[in-house]
Amino acid sequence: MRILRMLRMEVVRTRERMGTLKKAWDRLIQECPALIPFATYDWMECCLTKEQRPLFVICLWKDDELVGVAPWWLRIHRRRGFRVRQLEFISSADTPWADIVMREKDRSPVLEQVFRGLCTDFAAEWDVLSLQHWPEYSPNRSWVEHWLRVHRYRSFGTIFARIPCVPIQESWEAFASTKPQRTRKTQRNIENRVAKLPNVSVECHRGGEVEPLMTEVLAVAKKGWKFQEGKSLANQPRTIDFFSRLTERAVANGWLFLWVLRVDGVPVAMEYDLTDGRRVFALRSDFDETYRDCSPGRYLETHILKWLFEHQWEEYQYGPGVNPYKLFWATAIRQTVKLDIFNKTWRGRGLGLLECRVIPFAKTLRDRWLMRGAESHAST
């Protein structure tokens, strides 16, 4: 408790004040390498370009040193008929995971003060704290769940997303040999088709000016099937702005891996990745529909994996979602969770009762009724 009295708590609510935190946040995150890049100030600042929500960023200071950050914002929406004030991690559609930032040695005092302050000094300002994108094995999660039980707060947890990945523990040849013969044959056929194209090359951009890099990204994105269906990053001006800002910061921080497959000098596939120096996170990929029969996206993905194996990286993570194309090479699944914490306001209590008691009970009754109906039908 002596440590707790030394910490000063601040809730940052404006973009202007948020902007002054960069240097202190950057110093803190350098001592938390496992949280790079998606819990950094630069990632959060990019996310803020896409949504205009009120900030609720809790900062803990020890004198002039930032020792903890809970990067949340406020979303007001209707849920189960209630008008709910819901705190969430600052995020975007491209956020694979999120967490509270602190050094490991400071975990208990920082989390204790964050949740004590949230549930006392600021209890009147929120109804639900919805911790989405939370890594399943985050040590912060186990600490928070214990705190909630001790202080008798209702909570409800579910799987939020499944993220296929490729852990890198051996040579590419050894890894590929573990895949089914059909997978290896398919890959050989793809490589043979691409080899027949003129002047095939693959580039990896880790630096450079933002405009030419984004030109490469958009050139491919506008020729893909996602663009035709309105799902491409090139369809939305805010998404283009997000990736332009992100590219500038990723280059400055050494996070960027922008891969481009060219045929006769023309970009026909791209993949936009970020890295923390050990792992690679795939954010977006696309390919020119003209070359669909050659599977340029699969060819580029395999080229990237071979390079990562050769240079002994630790892991390659796809984006959230267990899609068939991701399972071509993926050998493991990482999970993120959503933990809803219900405040002791009347809205929080009412919604917590519905989510944690009434709805599960109703589903149990429904399942029993359906089972009895099926048994009765089978017996006749």
Image (cartoon, grey):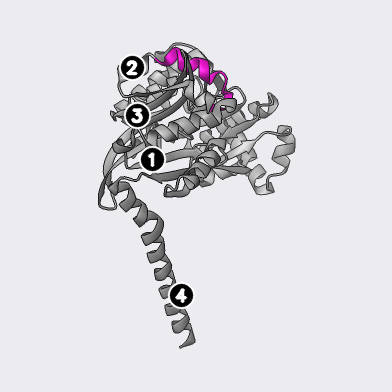
Residue 269 placement (x, y as % from top left): 48, 29
- Look at the numbered disc 4 and give the secondary structure of its residue: helix
Q: Earlier in the sequence, mark 3 or mark 2?
A: 2
Of mark 1 and mark 3, the one earlier in the sequence is 3
**Residue 182's spot in the image, x, y percent?**
65, 48
- Is any part of residue 283 visible from this angle? no
- Prevailing SS of the magenta stretch: helix
Give the foreground label among 2 and 4: 2
Q: Mark 3 — residue?
A: 56
Identified at 56% across, 26% down, the residue is 106
Q: Amino acid at mark 4?
A: Met
Question: What's the distance in space between the residues labelled 4 and 3, CA to CA?
Answer: 46 Å
Q: What is the x, y in percent for residue 248? A: 43, 15
For disc 4, the marked residue is 371
Q: Which residues are magenta?
A: 21-36
> Callout 3 environment at 10 Å: few (<14), some (14 to 19), or many (20+)?
many
* Residue drawn at the location 41% of the way across and 16% of the way down: 21
Q: CA distance from mark 2 to mark 1?
A: 23 Å
Determine the residue positioned at 51% across, 46% down. Answer: 322
Magenta span contains residue 31: yes
Q: Counting other residues with Cα less than 10 Å from the Cα at mark 2, is it few (<14), some (14-19), or many (20 or more)?
A: few
Identify the mark nearer the N-term, 1 or 4: 1
Residue that label 2 marks: 17
State if disc 3 and disc 4 touch (CB < 8 Å): no
